[in-house]
Image (cartoon, helix red, strand yellow):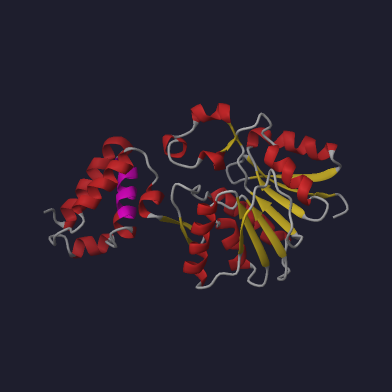
């Protein structure tokens, strides 16, 4: 049986073969802290004690060496101060989505708003909205029931009660029969299929393709549908593929809508705010 210290060093040395020393150490620290509840200080204080999870560690290392995201192996990730459950049914939330939500928060200070979070996935947007706007009515929709069930579990674990309306809804083929939202937020599938060859293995092999790729020839398919459903009544915020941002803006011009584009912290045109010019 390995000691705790020996298991920790074995983890880092194994991962360094593929990921390099610095990344391997960061991954090992995260794995031991979050999955095995062994922080570095605890490891030092109990270095010679027996590590009780050797078989699980070997399984986890095999998955990590196969480029499976660590968030899926641990079973959760963080989005701001929220702890979200994740598995291969949902995308792992990205920091850019937090930037989009900061834009929403800057624009809207009223408390009693109605939000619709389309293509919710992990529920990160809806849960962030609940945290920031506790009196709001929030609808969160997705085509996949397992994603909605996982997101609702995250809501209960973070807030001890459920108030978000988790709706199984096909954005492309169904109408909207609920309260009219003041604000619609959508991070839809937007990656074109011809971009797949340039994507990282951990994304391409493990994250759900239905949430990544636009299968139709029209890369703006989801944007156009959301605009069709909600532009008459709501302000829409989108996360974008920078490669199609100008196409979205041109489409909005053709529809006599105002489209404000915004870059992320990396300088990529990543977000859009769309509404009638009178709004």
Q: Is residue 177 left or right of residue 134?
A: right
Residue 184 coordinates in the image, percent (x, y): 71, 55
In this rendering, the answer to whether 127 lies above or below 264 is below
Q: Position of residue 164 (x, y in %)?
A: 61, 65
Q: Is residue 208 visible?
A: yes
Residue at (63, 71) in percent of width and height:
134
User: Residue 168 versus residue 249: which sits nearer the camera?
Assistant: 168
Question: As displayed, is residue 248 above or below residue 87?
Answer: above
Q: Quadrant of residue 189?
A: top right
Q: What residue is shown at x 26% (from left), y 46% (from top)?
A: 59
Q: Quadrant of the N terminus?
A: bottom left
Task: Specify the quadrant that holds the C terminus.
Answer: bottom right
Q: How many marks?
A: 0
Give the x, y percent position of residue 183. 73, 58
Judged left or right of residue 133, residue 181 is right
Dominant SS type (magenta) = helix
Say above or below: 103 vs 22. below
Give the image quarter of residue 206.
Answer: top left
On the picture, is 43 further left or further right than 209? left
Looking at the rendering, the stretch of residues picked out in magenta corresponds to: 21-31
User: Residue 1 lies in magenta, yes or no?
Assistant: no
Whether 30 is among the magenta residues is yes
Task: Identify the residue at horizontal 36%, vertical 54% (top origin).
Answer: 74
């Amino acid at each position: 049986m390995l000691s705790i210290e020996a298991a920790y060093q074995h983890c880092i040395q194994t991962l360094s073969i593929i990921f390099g020393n610095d990344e391997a150490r960061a991954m090992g620290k995260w794995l031991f802290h979050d999955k095995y509840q062994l922080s570095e200080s605890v490891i030092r204080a109990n270095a010679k004690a027996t590590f009780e999870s050797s078989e699980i560690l070997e399984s986890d290392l095999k998955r990590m060496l196969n480029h499976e995201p660590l968030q899926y192996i641990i079973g959760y990730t963080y989005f701001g101060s929220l702890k979200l459950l994740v598995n291969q049914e949902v995308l792992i939330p990205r920091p850019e989505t937090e930037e989009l939500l900061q834009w929403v928060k800057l624009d809207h200070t009223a408390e009693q708003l109605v939000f619709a979070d389309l293509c919710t996935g992990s529920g990160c947007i809806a849960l962030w909205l609940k945290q920031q706007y506790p009196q709001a009515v929030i609808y969160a929709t997705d085509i996949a029931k397992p994603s909605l069930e996982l997101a609702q579990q995250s809501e209960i674990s973070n807030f001890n009660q459920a108030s978000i309306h988790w709706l199984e809804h096909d954005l492309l083929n169904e109408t909207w029969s609920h309260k009219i939202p003041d604000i619609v937020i959508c991070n839809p599938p937007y990656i074109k299929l011809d971009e797949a060859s340039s994507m990282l293995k951990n994304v391409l092999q493990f994250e759900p393709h239905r949430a990544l790729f636009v299968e139709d020839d029209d890369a703006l398919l989801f944007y156009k549908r959301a605009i069709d459903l909600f532009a008459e009544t709501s302000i829409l915020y989108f996360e974008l593929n920078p490669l199609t941002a100008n196409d979205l803006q041109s489409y909005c011009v053709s529809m006599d809508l105002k489209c404000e584009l915004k870059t992320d912290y990396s300088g990529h045109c990543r977000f859009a705010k769309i509404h009638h010019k009178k709004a």
